[in-house]
Each structure stands twice: as structure tokens, then as C-alpha cells.
Amino acid sequence: MDNNAAAVKALELYKVNAKLCDPHPSKKGTASTYLESSTHSNSASSEQQANHKEAHALRDNFKDVTHLTEEKVYEILDICGEKEDYSPLIRVIGRVFSSAEGLVQSFRRSKPHTKEELKSLQGKDEDKDEDEKEAAACSATAMEEDSPTSSSSTRPGEGSSGDNDVQKLAPDEVSVDIEAVRRVYERLLSNEKIEAAFLNALVYLSPNVECDLTYHNVYSRDPNYLNLFVIVMENSNLHSPEYLEIALPQFCKAMSKLPLAAQAKLARLWSHYSAEQIRRMMETFQQLITYKVISNEFNSRNLVNDDDAVVAATKCLKIVYYANVLGGDLDVEHNEEEDEEPIPESSELTLQELLGEERRNKKGPRVDPLETELGVRTNDCRRPLIPFEEFVNEPLNEVLEMDKDYTFFKVETENKFSFMTCPFVLNAVTKNLGLYYDNRIRMYSERRITVLYSLVQGQQLNPYLRLKVRRDHIIDDALVRLEMIAMENPADLKKQLYVEFEGEQGVDEGGVSKEFFQLVVEEIFNPDIGMFTYDEYTKLFWFNPSSFENEGQYTLIGIVLGLAIYNNCILDVHFPMVVYRKLMGKKGTFRDLADANPVLNQSLKELLEYEGSVEDDMMITFQISHTDLFGNPLMYDLRENGDKIPVTNENRREFVAQYSDYILNKSVEKQFKAFRRGFHMVTNESPLKYLFRPEEIELLICGSRVRPAAADRFRGFWETLHSFGEEQKRLFLQFTTGTDRAPVGGLGKLKMIIAKNGPDTDRLPTSHTCFNVLLLPEYNNKDKLRERLLKAITYAKGFGML
């Protein structure tokens, strides 16, 4: 027989429990697929007898075991239990689990996972057919790629016996019996001596695996090599202290060397795991990162970016993160269409090229390679298996030198790692700081280009985006000026904003811009203007589908929002979350109605849950009505001749989906596209989309809604402030900082200075909103302090020079 025929025959005999024959005198014991054992044939009967005894001795000591199956483990375990000596099992585990060849061959299964088996990976179906489970121990199947490369070397995949051709596997399947591995770990890890064998074996295994992946391209030769990572990661004790010092860091370094295709394979496989299993793996890598951070003193001279263990663990955590995304509630279909007209390039581009300053990110915003390989984005995930917030590592954020990390992010060198390439591990405050550096450097770049332009072509120097506005005509002045800039040279929007109120002496160091944005927002979102509608129940604004304003006005509003982020200003705007999802490229669906229009959402939800006859009892058709700005009813057909198509129990889901699509997308398509275009004019080259999720974009624009907290030595002042009402506290915050919102991260991140400004006087308190400084005279009693402070914050509009 050839090898394949013999394997088939062996399986057939195994199924019927055929009695094993004694080893043939001319053959030695079992050999690994990867390791070929030389055979010796002797004709003398005495030598045959000696070989026969030797074979039995090897069998007793399990020295012939080069890879493991579930049954083999239990067999050895039972024998060791009878003798009360587990040293043979410990030696076998040490030998197999320290060998890449042996581990790759271990715990193989005979068939691809069925749908039921994939469910069992989530812990829902623990019962598996015994015959199939036993067959998995004896048959080696391959993954979807062949292993054509052959060599005289005996590295994994180089001398395999062709079992890569046995069977093709799906992108989310491996040839290892995961359930069998879990059962084995469950029985063995309760024994401390056996657990130590796993630990020591991993220390020996990891450097060799790292070498194989780095220098020998082993995965491309044999994709089954991925099995060893699957098997090791099933060890539920990986996060225990014994592993953190040496074993786990070395294993993470090896795992981080996996090629992109292998990482994607792992992510797809793990996406079938339960939330608890994803959380266990996430906590394993998080534990290592935290341990390394708190056990070292990282600073500007000793960067956490240079710690191999932290970097490797973060890269491994990325695989788990995308498994968490893939395994969650995905919506990959409802995507916003790209702008038909590309955002115009700067007219300064030619000069930049002449100066060797070709525009950064000219090919578009950065995209994570693993995200591209998997064909999924974080924003496609409505609800992950475990919350995104659990992937944030706060100790890492505290020691990260963001200015250095941003430099590594922009330079993209292989020898310097940037944690901005793994934004899921960063909190909103840290990412906001990275965005701040990006914006500032872009501003300085535009300023430098402007200076060079003036030198080369003799043009007037204008390094800032200057807006001179009249307080009484702020909308007309600002939007007309911004419209001209957007048409003539959009690159000027990337310059630092400098606002000047006509007739006032205020110098814009940030505070004047804050008030400018606040006044613009108050005017634009005034319901009387009619650009946005206001919902009294949700306290949120929405685009007015029947607005008389042209698309240009909405484009300018988008520019204002983009400028606010670009210039690190917080706005008092109130949009439903679906607006930020749409800005990030996702269309609104029925699920977004709960936030945007809860009344309609409840009605449609009741329609879906109605148990009677929808057609007979509700008499609804695919024609809907809504009112315009003046309260006049407008009809709209969700389908052609919608008034003649009744909504039934069978088509009600389609009706709900199309109704939601109309309200959130089609009815405001022109307004929103113009709004988004303006927003992208400012942020198109920014890493905004790469770093932030929609809820974090809202946080960037609007800040946190919190109230001031009292904790300072100025007891009388804070007692007075605490006696204020909610609205008065908001006015105080706006008076002192230029906005009534807290920065990203809450008021704990707000640096506010209260400075004494002379002895008792009748003068009002003043503030430097550019620097968040409150100048407070030393009033002689609390009543006077309260009266003066209330008057200052109530009539706080305008800037003057002290």
C-alpha cells in the first residue's frame, strides 16, 4: 500500500476496534510526520528478539511519542495515575510542547468544523461525537494552502509527507481539534507539576518559533504551523504570574512575527469564540502590558515604545481586538457613498513638490493592514463581543510620551513602533493629544509653505486663517469669508484660525476663537433660521429636509465643525449619534432611530412585534407622510406605487428598513452630503477616522457634560459657586474657559487657574479664556463676591485689553 491507502485502512480498522498487532521486528515505533526515523533491518533471530524487547521498553517509557492526541494523553495519564508517578507524562509534555514540529502535528481532527462545531467553540455545544473525536487523533489534515517548497532541511513544512493536499479548509478553520485541546488542558492544569511542564516547554519553544517565522518563512510552506498558536492560547493559565516574566513575553514576540494572512486567520477563527473566551485572551495580553509598564520606569529617555514585550503584546492584542469586532454584531452593507467631487487639492501643491515637500497622506487616510485583510472596519461593528473600552490600557496611556509616539506614527519606520497604530489600546485623551500634534504640525507646515511662497512669488504673507467679523453680523461675515476660502484655496482651512471681532481689542490666543465658535453655533442652530429642526423630547438637532437654505450653507457648517476639531475648540452642538456614524461613513438604519427619533422608533418596533394581522388591523401602505417647515403634509412612496402596496406581516421588516432609510438618509441626502463635504475639507488629511470611533468624535466636538467639582483652598469662592444653579454654573465655566463644556476626559483634564487680582474693589472679576485663568479681586464678604461674580458671568460677551 502507499501512504494514503494505508492511512484509510488504518482508520477503518480503528473504527471497528480491531486488535492491534505486535510491532514488526524489522520496524521501529511510530515516527512523526516531520521527523523521519531511520530503520534498521537485521536477519539474525537473536537480534530480532532484542529489538522486540526494546520496542516494548520504548512503549513503556513513551519515548516514541513525538506528537499528542487526546486519547494518547489520557492513556499516559491513566498509566501514571496507576503508578502514582507522573514523570513520564511530564517528559512527554515537555518533549511535544517544546517542539514546533510535535505541537503542529498534535490534536489533529479528521474533518473541517461543521456549523454545529463552530457553535461549540462558543461554549454552546460541548458534546461531540466520540468516533469523530477519536478519528481526529489519528488523522492529519491540512489547511487551505499547499506546501510546495521542499528542502533538505527538516523544518516544519519542508519535509512533510504531503498531508497539506488532503483537504482544503475555510478561511476561519484550522486542522486542530480545539475542543479536544480544551478538555486536555482542563484535566492536566489541575496538577501543579504538569503545569510547570507547560511553562518550561513554552520558554524553550518560543525562541525557535520566532526564528522560524522571521527567517524561514515557515507559515507559507505549511499553514498548519498556525496550530501551535491555537493550542498554546487555549492554556487558561497564560496570564498567571509564573508566565509573565519570561514565557509569555517570548511567546508574544514569536506570535507578533506571524505574517498578515496568518493574523487574519487567527482573528477569523477566534471570532467564533464566546465573549468569555475573547475576554480571557484579551486579559492575558493586557496583564502582560500592565505588568511590564508598572515594573519599569518609562519616561522620555526610556520610552515604552522600545520595550519589546509591551510592543509584542500590543500587536497580539490587535488580533484579539479584530476577532472581537468580527464576532460582534456587524453591519458591513450600509455605507455612505463617497463624495462625487473630490476635495480640491491646494494650489500650493506644485510649489511643495518643487521644494521636496510633497503633501503627506496624498493617497488618502491611513488604513490598518489587518483591517484591509479582513475586509471589516471597527465602525462596521454595532456591538462587539466585549466592550471596546476593555481594550484600553490606562497604565500604558499614563507613561506614553505622545509627542515621540506621534513622530514614530508619521515616520513609519520598521524599527520604531507607534501605539497610534493600535488606537484601540489608547483612551480618548491620549488620542486627542495625538490629533492635536497632527493638527499643530500641519498648521506649522502650512505657515512655512506660505512664507516660502511669499519669498518665491512675492505674494503678501498670510500665514493664518484670519476671520474678521462683526458681532452683529457674525454668520454673514464668517460664512461668506469661509465660502471664498473653500472655493479659492481649501488648503488655507488647514492654517491656524485667528479671529478678530471688529471694534474690539481682544488678541486671539484661543479664547476669541472659542467665543466665535460659540456664537456661530448659537446662530446656526437657531430653529428660526430653519436649517435644523429641534426635538423637544430628545433635546437634539436634525437636518431640516425642507430647508430653504442652499447646499453651500450646510457645507460651511461642516467646515465650522471641522475647524473646531482642528483648532481644539469644544462646541455646544447636540446631534444624535447617527450623525457621527454618517460622518465616519456609515448610513443610518432602524437601530439608529432609537436615538434620533425615539417616538417613531417605538412605533416601528411595535409594528414589528405585533402578533395580529398587520394588513387587516393597521391598514398601512408603503406610502408615508411627513410635514414640511410650515406644517404642510408631504407624501413619499417608499416603493413605486407605494400607496397601493399594503404592509403585511411578511413585508413589514422591509417597510421598517425603508422607512428608517428615508428618515435618516434619503430625506436629508443633499443637506448631509454638503455638510460632510465641508467637514472633510478640514479633516480629510487628518488621522481622525483612523483613531476615533463615532462616540469619540462626538466627545471631541462636544466635550463631556459634567458639572464643576469643588476642591480648593478658596472655600468662600467654592461655597458661592456651589450655591449657583445649574445654568449659572454653566455660565461660569463658559466665562472662565470660553465654553460651557468640559474637555475630552472630563474636568479632571481642565487646567484652570484662579488668581488674586488686587484688594477689595467694585470691579468685576475678569478672565483670560485663552489660558483658562480667572482673575478674582479679594472681595471682603461672600455676598459681594456672589453679586460681582454673577454679574460678570451673566453679561460676559466681548473682549477688551486690560
Image (cartoon, rainbow, N blue to C red):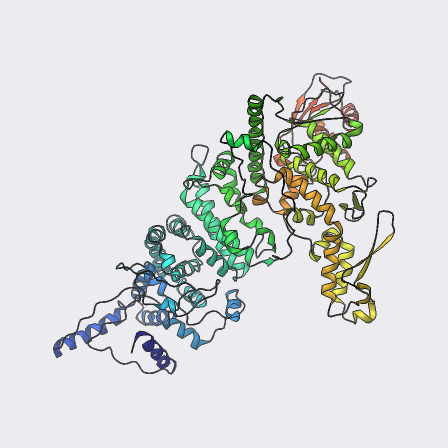
Task: Decide: is 66 above or below 379.
Answer: below
Q: Position of residue 144 (x, y in %)?
A: 43, 64
- The answer to whether any part of residue 395 appears in the image is no
Give the total of numbered labels. 0
Task: Decide: is 181 above or below 792.
Answer: below
- For image coordinates 51% across by 67% down, the residue present is 118
**Quadrant (top left/top right/bottom left/bottom right) for the C terminus:** top right
From the viewer's perspective, tell me whether residue 773 is left or right of residue 67: right
- For image coordinates 33% across by 50% down, the residue present is 215
Q: Which quarter of the picture shows residue 499?
A: top right
From the viewer's perspective, tell me whether residue 737 is left or right of residue 430: right
Q: Which quarter of the picture shows residue 53?
A: bottom left
From the viewer's perspective, tell me whether residue 91 is left or right of residue 38: right
Q: Position of residue 437 (x, y in %)?
A: 55, 34
Task: Decide: is 93 above or below 632.
Answer: below
From the viewer's perspective, tell me whether residue 431 is left or right of residue 218: right
- The answer to whether any part of residue 470 appears in the image is yes
Q: Position of residue 510 (x, y in %)?
A: 66, 27
Q: Position of residue 110 (x, y in %)?
A: 41, 72
**Quadrant (top left/top right/bottom left/bottom right) for the N terminus:** bottom left
Task: Decide: is 508 above or below 546.
Answer: above
